[in-house]
Every structure is written in C-alpha cells, then in structure tokens.
Image: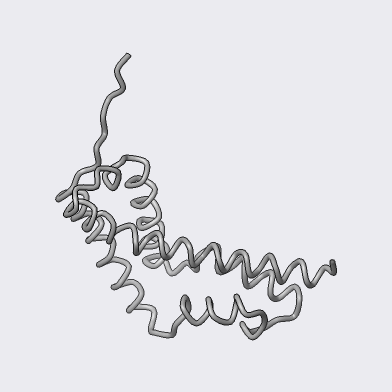
Amino acid sequence: MSRDFFLQLLADAVLTLHVAVVVFVVGGLLLVFVGNWRGWRWVNGPRFRLVHLALVALVAVQSWLGVICPLTDIEMWLRAKIGSPTYHGSFIEHWLQRLLYYEAPPWVFVLVYTLFGLLVVAAWVLFPPGFRRRKP
C-alpha cells in the first residue's frame, strides 16, 4: 500500500467521520423531539443528551470565534500531503463533500449554528434529560 493511497483513505475516513458528526448533531435534535412525542425514553438518556449538547456547543463556539472545525483541518492537511487541492478524488470524498460543504458568508453559519444551539437548549427545557441517581 503506497503512502499516498493510505493518506487518501485516511482523509476519506476523516470526511466520513465529519459527516457522521453532522448527522448525529442534526439527527440527535430531531430524535429528541420525535422520541419524546413517541414516548422513547432513551432519547432523554444523560449520555446521549450530554454528548449531543457538547458537540452543538463546540460547533457554536467555533463559529463565534471564527475557528475552522478540527476535522476539516485534519482532512485538508492529509489531502495537501498527497497534493490533492480539491475534493476531486474518490467516490466517497466526491459525494460526501457535496453533502457536507457549501458556500455562504460566515455570518450565515454563525446565525444557523447559534439558532440550532438555542433549539437544543429549548429541547433541554421542554424534555429534560433523565438524570437518575443509582441505588447503592
């Protein structure tokens, strides 16, 4: 296996992880609302809700500070190592890139991430996580 091929696979894996995080963040909020409507108790589990909240907070804070997501930085660094300036490589990177990356002024992302964060806070108020004490 050549070094470039390995780095290409690694860059594709980082992009796939990035898409999975986005799906979890967006889908997680949807699951909280739908799950509470449908009576699914697991959607209010503390682990699920805390991980979701932490990721949403991280995305919002990064946007306020103008910081690029570390997953994007890692992926771009890997692609630069193999001389791939764009996303015109493998099937995975071509289609996942179209799904994940889009162009808009920075203020649009700050607004969207902030509003999404406020929706997550509203979900915590409307459907509080089920923090229960363990019995000894």
Does residue 26 lie above or below 131 as drawn? below
Q: Position of residue 117 (x, y in %)?
A: 28, 60
Q: Residue furthest right?
A: 2
Where residue 43 appears, as percent x and y from the top left, is 28, 48
Position of 32 with respect to 109 (left or right) is left
- Out of 76 and 16, give the one closest to the viewer: 16
Left or right: 115 in relation to 105: left
Find residue 23 and report its image quarter: bottom left
Q: Position of residue 106 (x, y in %)?
A: 39, 79
- Quarter of the picture containing the N terminus is bottom right
Question: Which of the colour schemes (rainbow, by chain, secondary structure, one colour) is used?
Answer: one colour
* Residue drawn where x is 79% and y is 72% of the image: 4
Q: Residue visible at 53% across and 76% down?
A: 96
Quadrant in the picture for residue 132: top left
48 to the left or right of 19:
left
Task: Look at the picture and state if 97 lies above or below 10.
Answer: below
Residue at the outermost top position? 136
Q: Quadrant of the C terminus?
A: top left
Residue at 24% of width from left, 47% of height from top?
40
How many labels were placed on the picture?
A: 0
- Does 132 appear above or below 96? above
Side of 120 relative to 47 (left or right): left
Please name the residue shown 74% across and 68% down the image.
Answer: 7
Is 46 or 54 nearer to us in this picture?
A: 46
Q: Give percent across and percent down for residue 21.
A: 46, 61
